[in-house]
Image (spheres, helix red, strand yellow):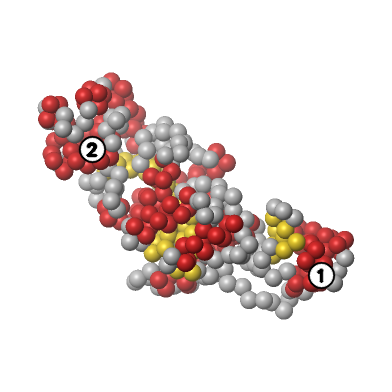
Amino acid sequence: MKPEPGLASWLQLTLTPGLGPASLQRMLRQFGLPQAVLARKRAELAAFAAPAVLAALDSEAVAQAVARALAWAAQPGCALITLADETYPRLLLEIADPPALLYAQGRLELLARPALAVVGSRNATQQGEANAEALAKALSESGLTIVSGLALGIDAAAHRGGLAGAGSSIAVLGTGIDLTYPGRNAALAGEIAGRGLLVSEFPLGTPPAAQNFPRRNRLISGLARGCLVVEAALASGSLITARAAAEQGREVFAIPGSIHSPLAKGCHALIKSGAKLVESAEDVLAELAGFRPSGYASTTKETPSSSDTGLLAHMGHDPVDVDSLCSRAGMSAEQVSSELLRLELDGRVAALPGGLYQRLEKGQRR
């Protein structure tokens, strides 16, 4: 994509070490576009930044960083989007601190489409990942773009589901866009760059750092009309995203789980505080004003089936141990263990930590 005139000025400001978003916003409000800011005498900018920052503004290091970013943006599929661009996401303009510049790779048109954030635990259960992928696919098939953070677990499953539908998926990164974190999601990141969109507000080469991810989370929710939490512990980054969504005036959704599961407690806390309880894609679509279901294929609702015979008929939907199954089914421990192994190989049951087992819903096997 051909760089827009004045882009180097945006880069010079955003790549200057120590010039934070708040100071940059004040400069822009006072003087106008970055070209106008940079045209001012440095003494006039002293009210907005420390002397060391103003010295760095005109440094060779910043000039080289600007050249690298421009060279990156000149590659096919890559773009730099500023606050002044028509392609800048309208929803981000509604949040308290929109980034002055976004690095993007892939299908820019996705930024203008209605979207839903889907987030959850990195250490998700197999069922949780299956639910996230199935719901994301159904919502994507209905036209919603799925936004998430490229983390392991629920995020990755949501991206896979989003890519499987017409709505596709946007991944918001907590690193520079030229890096992939975590490395295990490199192939998925490549798929998103090709068929969806990668987005970051961080300069090229920015490594993963703890303070980056809460900032990343506000963009995940900011790009979307609502935020769905699939699985989350009480101390979870996903709850930060949900709080950001609520503060931004977005709808917040959560999937309930077993009262015994630590990964359901965050979702239950959200529901208690007013989040919409979700069992199916229709539950989400019905809450988004002006958005209607259109041929989505799958949901997380499951009614007991008469074809569930043998041990499955006694499992229920909560995690359960072998002794309880022996008692329910009237089978020996050897018989139960053998049947559990068969069901696990068939994708009907997942083994959980602590010697527990959980039934997997039909149509959501992995």
**Where's residue 167, x and y in %?**
44, 60
**Where's residue 330, x and y in %?**
85, 72
Residue at coordinates 35% horizontally, 41% vertically from top-left?
A: 201
Quadrant placement of the C terminus: bottom right
Residue matched to label 2 = 23
Q: Quadrant of residue 352?
A: bottom right
Is residue 308 shown to the viewer in this render? yes
Q: Residue furthest top?
A: 60
Taking 36 as reference, is 110 left or right?
right
**In the rendered image, the vertical position of residue 334 relative to residue 287, given as above or below:** above
Is residue 155 shown to the viewer in this render? no
- Kind of residue at disc 1: Ser
SS label for mark 1: helix
Q: Which mark is residue 327?
A: 1
**Where's residue 109, x and y in %?**
35, 53
Q: Quadrant of residue 361?
A: bottom right
Mark 2, Cα crowd under 10 Å, few <14 / some 14-19 / many 20+, is some
Quadrant placement of the N terminus: top left
Mark 1, Cα crowd under 10 Å, few <14 / some 14-19 / many 20+, is few
Taking 61 as reference, is 327 left or right?
right
Residue at coordinates 34% horizontally, 57% vertically from top-left?
A: 247
SS label for mark 2: helix
